[in-house]
Image (tube, grey):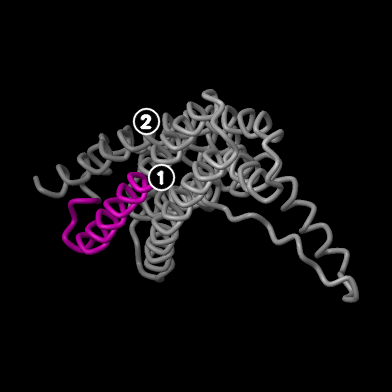
Amino acid sequence: MAASYHARSNNLPSRQHPIVSQIDENLNRLRASQSASTSSSIGHNLSGLKDLHKCVDVLLQFPLTQQALAQEKQREMVEELLDGSLMLLDVCTTAKDALLQTKECTQELQSILRKRCGAEGLANEFRKYLTSRKAMKKAICKALQNLKHIQNKLSTPGENGAVISVLRDVEAVTISVLESVLSFISRPEAESKSSRWSLVSKLMHQKKEMCEEEQKANEILNAEAAVRSCIKSKNMKHVENVQKELQSSELSIQDLEEGLETLSRRMIKTRVTVLNIISC
């Protein structure tokens, strides 16, 4: 980490400055938790990402930082980062819309289940829920492709000043966290089929176990799986389990919605600050 501080010291506050240290600590913490796959861990990362952007806002207030961003030779990189931040805000909006749509369908289905409709009526409502989830996943897929596009641009090598390097690091971590959010919302059910006659390595077996554990921890996926199971079995006795999973899913969605909303507001503030600096 000392090398990182040294590389940044030319046009950032002193390497001993608390805000520089805090940014690096937040970046490292988020990088270390990139494999987050539960709603609580992802929510924690969204909160950590919000704090990181808050630190960046403080950094952007330093005259030395502003002078570095205002340099003509940095203009192209700054504008590229601004384009990326706009796309990231669009991705945030897509994620929030997907969560809202899923929450509304979840609440509507819960309301119908409480009315104790007949088996045929419930089956139709279950299918409507699954159809809505399918449409939502298409939008998520497109958003994930956009994240990949931004990520590819960030991986392009070039001579960057210290401030630009920090902003690129922050954008890269933001992409990672948002990717985990989108994957959590839309992750398809893990394939359960396996060829009995084939040899499966220990590594693949461990990977499958990890995937199954992630599924158990995904409240949104559990609700969807419960609905599918109820349709497949045609046994309305499973309705109580569906209700239970839908309630858990709704709570999970609420936490993620709040995390994305606060992050979006912080990202907008950072973007506006950078725009003001380069327009002066």
Magenta segment includes 76: yes
Q: Position of residue 31 (x, y in %)?
A: 57, 48
Q: Residue furthest bottom?
A: 198
Residue drawn at x 46%, y 46% is 128
| Residue situated in front as seen by the camera: 92 or 177 | 92
| Residue situated in front as seen by the camera: 153 or 180 | 180
Residue position for label 1: 98
Q: Position of residue 40 (x, y in %)?
A: 59, 32
263 relative to 119 in the view: left or right = left
Residue drawn at x 57%, y 40% is 220
Magenta segment includes 231: no
Circle 2 sits in a helix, a strand or a loop, which is it?
helix
Q: Position of residue 63 (x, y in %)?
A: 22, 38
Indicate whether 183 appears above or below 141.
above
| Three-letter residue code for mark 1 | Ala
Q: Position of residue 56 (x, y in %)?
A: 35, 38
Of helix, strand and loop, which mostly describes the magenta segment? Answer: helix
Residue drawn at x 86%, y 70% is 200
- Res 36 seen here: no
| Residue situated in front as seen by the camera: 189 or 163 | 189
Residue position for label 2: 262
Residue drawn at x 18%, y 51% is 70
| Earlier sequence position, callout 2 versus callout 1 | 1
Res 29 quadrant in image: top right
- Res 152 seen here: yes
Range shown magenta: 69-94
| Three-letter residue code for mark 2 | Thr
235 relative to 151 in the view: left or right = right
Indicate whether 191 appears above or below 259.
below
